Amino acid sequence: MESSTEPAAPARTFSQVVFTDIPHSYPPSTHVTCSYTLTADLQPTSRDWVGIFKVGWSSTKDYHTFVWVESCQDAAGQSVTSQAAFKDYYLPKDEVEFYQFCYVDSSGQVRGASTPFCFRNPAEQSMESSPDDDLLVITTQEQVELSVREKAELQKQLNQIMEEKETLKQVLQQEQQEAAGLKEQNEQKEREIFKLVKELGQTKEQSENLKSALEQQLKEKDHLKEEMLTQMTKQMEMQQRDTAEQEKQCLASRHKEEKYDRALMKIKQLKEEREELRGGVEAQSAEISMLKSKVREDEREMFNIQDGIQLLQVDLQSSEKENARLSAELQQLKSLAHSVDDVKRENQELCRRLSQQETPHTSPDDDLKVRCQTLAGQLQDTQAKLAAEKKESKNARRRAEHVEGELLQVKQQLETLVSTFEQEQRKNNKLELQLRELHELIADKDGTIEEKDHVITLTRHEKDELLRENQNLVSDIEGLRTLYAEYHAAPPAGMNPSHPQQQQEETPEQAEHLYETIGSAADPEEEALVCRHCQEIFPFITREELEQHEQSHKVCPFCTMICDNMEQSVYEDHVYGHEL
């Protein structure tokens, strides 16, 4: 059989041959006969043929089997109804695919096509039947390829979305691990802070002990002064006792030296702790800067996620609008199909009445024939329009289902992104809270370090001043020893007898002066500490005790005035007066 290689004819030529009474399925392994009607403007020839095509064919070469059409020369200008018979041996054996009859003329043009049908048993067909199976489906290879490409693009987009989802999941797991590490570091820092607080409490306790010892020594000093006043008249007898006391003072001096060495060791230890704290603070500062950079990166990533959510929302809105538009078009097509069905029923009713009115003994009426031909042409046009509208309705329904599927996927993606964004936001809030607590702890550590630096600086200055005062006192003691020796070695004649009153007045003063310097003269190496505010001398005390005494003073930071007797409000007004 010869056939054309041209693509299928346009849909408007399909209305020239109408296949009637085509069932939804034919029993397999049986002969098949189809009926068709040729319009008045189509003249059949012996080279015309009717073929069985699989639904989705793109060329007249895609036929499965065919039969030649019987030519009818007597029906020129009239509608002709004929049949085509197919033997069971040449029929398709596939019970899944759908097929349709197509009328092809001698030039290879398709002049008509039937509704789809299949080869199944009636029981199977009744279970799988649906109200939309009588729609005419005519498609081309280009449309099939286009749908395949669209499906591939959608699959590619779906794969990209799944990859993005996996990437976000990995990033989330990594951030959770980082949060766990930060939590562990914070716990370790809390333990270190607890240890520092404990050491600070021990230091305060030692300070209280030193303060109580200082008060006890002050009481002993007052008691010693009273004893020295009572023993002024027994100075010569107490010289031997002074020697024993000098030995005791030497032992006390050694004890003070040991205390001073311990103080130096404590200062050195504080310096080392300060260096360690500085190193820890620098490491924590670097870690805080790194955490800040990570937080900024997380914020940028959240902004990107928000932009993606906004884009998805815009796509969702456009998809909803498209879905509404397609639904409206589908409703219009359904109403049009109903109207076409009504016209078809009216035409069938008119044809039935016309056939009833015709009898074999009466001659045909010309007006009635013209009316019948007109109605037949209108019926064919209406059937062609109905087929086209059914095709558009089915395509619109498929597009609507596709858009609904995409809309559902977009909604799911949007919900996933929203949940991910909320989790990231809660995580960032926790990190900010932890960073704020870490900053507060570091600030407390900085305050403690500054306080210790200040104490060390004050201790160093006091040590220098005390060394200078000790040297001055040693030189004064040497001069007093010289005067004391000259006083006792001078002859009695050297005194002026006319002034006995002067001799009696000078002796107690010299004795008192010598009595005040006995302790220092006994041991020239003994270090006497002097308060740098009230200039009071404190022998037999350590530098820590002197530091506590100096800190007990209320001193103006501008004029160095001692304000111990002032009330707190008066003292504050005095200080603020310097600032003004």
Image: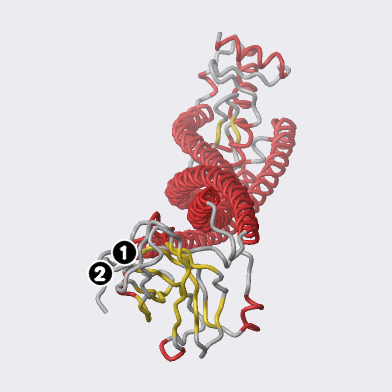
Pinpoint residue 69: horizontal percent, then vertical percent. 37, 75
Residue 431 appears in the rendering: no
Q: To which residue does mark 1 refer?
A: 109
* Distance Cα–Cα, label 1 vs label 2: 8 Å
Q: Residue at x 31, y 74 (%)?
A: 46
Say which of 165 and 492 sits in front: 165
Q: Do the numbered discs 1 and 2 sit on residues whose CB atoms are within 8 Å? A: yes
Residue type, numbered disc 1? Gln
Q: Based on the displayed image, in which of its 4 quarters is residue 148 positioned?
A: bottom left
Q: Secondary structure at mark 1?
A: loop
Q: Which sits earlier in the primary sequence, circle 1 or circle 2?
A: 2
Q: Residue at x 46, y 72 (%)?
A: 82
Q: Residue at x 52, y 78 (%)?
A: 118
Q: How many marks?
A: 2
Say which of 542 and 292 sits in front: 292
Q: To which residue does mark 2 refer?
A: 4
* Quarter of the image with the N terminus in it: bottom left
Pinpoint residue 548: horizontal percent, then vertical percent. 63, 37
